[in-house]
Amino acid sequence: MDSEKAIWIWPKSGTETLIQFLFFILIIYFLIQFLGYLSRRNHNARQNWVRLSILATKRGLKLSQKKILHLFFFRLKLKQQETIFDSKEQLFHLLFHYFANLDDGHSDTYLEIIHLLHFQNSSIDSYPLKSPFELQEKEMIAYRSQSNSGLAKVTTRSSEQIVLSIKGKKFHKLPQNGKMEAIVYRKGVGIQRFQGKSKKISHNHIAFIPTGQLG
């Protein structure tokens, strides 16, 4: 092979060459702008993680809970990381959606994290519940049964049972009939557990029939 043979030669001068050169410069310009755009977005996301970490410290989250929060944040899409503090409800919405779809038996921990970071209802006071029938409609609770655990919201209540709307994609695992534990969080009190029975009444609703308090 001829070592002096040119591998590539810039085209001869002319209009075509000028157009190709300008096009090349334009590509470089847009590439730099795009990389800068991604860099700014990632910077904003990192700043929001710092802000969330500081909030977690101020609200008294334990180290184990902060690790869970770290895993939650960095599993979000970049757009969600950027907008997590755009409104008061955004953080709560993202936390609830993420934790509701987990099924690892730690729903009580997730319930506490959500309440520490964002109280669902400001009218909920610091006094412990004497009975689960004191739960408010739309209030968030955690539940645990032999088949699974997760998060739910109170739909309705009567003198005998509390109807819960189960959140997350766990409909096929809902307890049909059997023992169930309802877990509630109260500011200044912490976790409260109520023992009871469950009865499935629709694809994503169960009735909780309290029988006592576990602690």
Image (cartoon, rainbow, N blue to C red):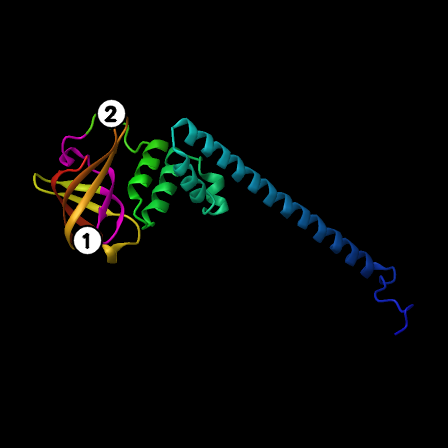
Q: Is residue 138 above or below residue 147?
A: above
Q: Earlier in the sequence, mark 2 or mark 1?
A: 2
User: Left or right: 94 with respect to 211?
Assistant: right
Residue 201, how many percent across, how many down? 15, 53
- Quarter-wise, where is residue 153 in the image? top left
Can residue 199 be seen here? The reply is: no
* Rendering quarter of residue 38: top right
Compared across the picture, whether 18 is left or right of 144 comes to right
Residue 29 sits inside the magenta stretch: no
Specify the amino acid type for callout 1: Pro
Which residues are the magenta region?
129-153
For the residue marked with disc 2, what is the amino acid? Ser
Q: Please give the residue where the numbered disc 1 appears in the rendered image.
A: 175
- Label 1 SS: loop
Could you say where residue 142 lies in the image, as x and y percent from the top left?
25, 42
Specify the quadrant of the image occupied by residue 11. bottom right
Asked which secondary structure carries label 2, the reply is loop
Q: Residue at x 21, y 55 (%)?
A: 203
Q: Dividing the image into 4 quarters, which one contains the C terminus?
A: top left
Is residue 1 positioned above or below 191 on the image?
Answer: below
Q: Residues within 10 Å of mark 1 (few under 14, many from 20)?
A: many
Q: What label sits on residue 126 in the rendered view?
A: 2
Give the Cα distance between marks 2 and 1.
Answer: 31 Å
The location of residue 181, given as percent across then percent down, is 19, 44
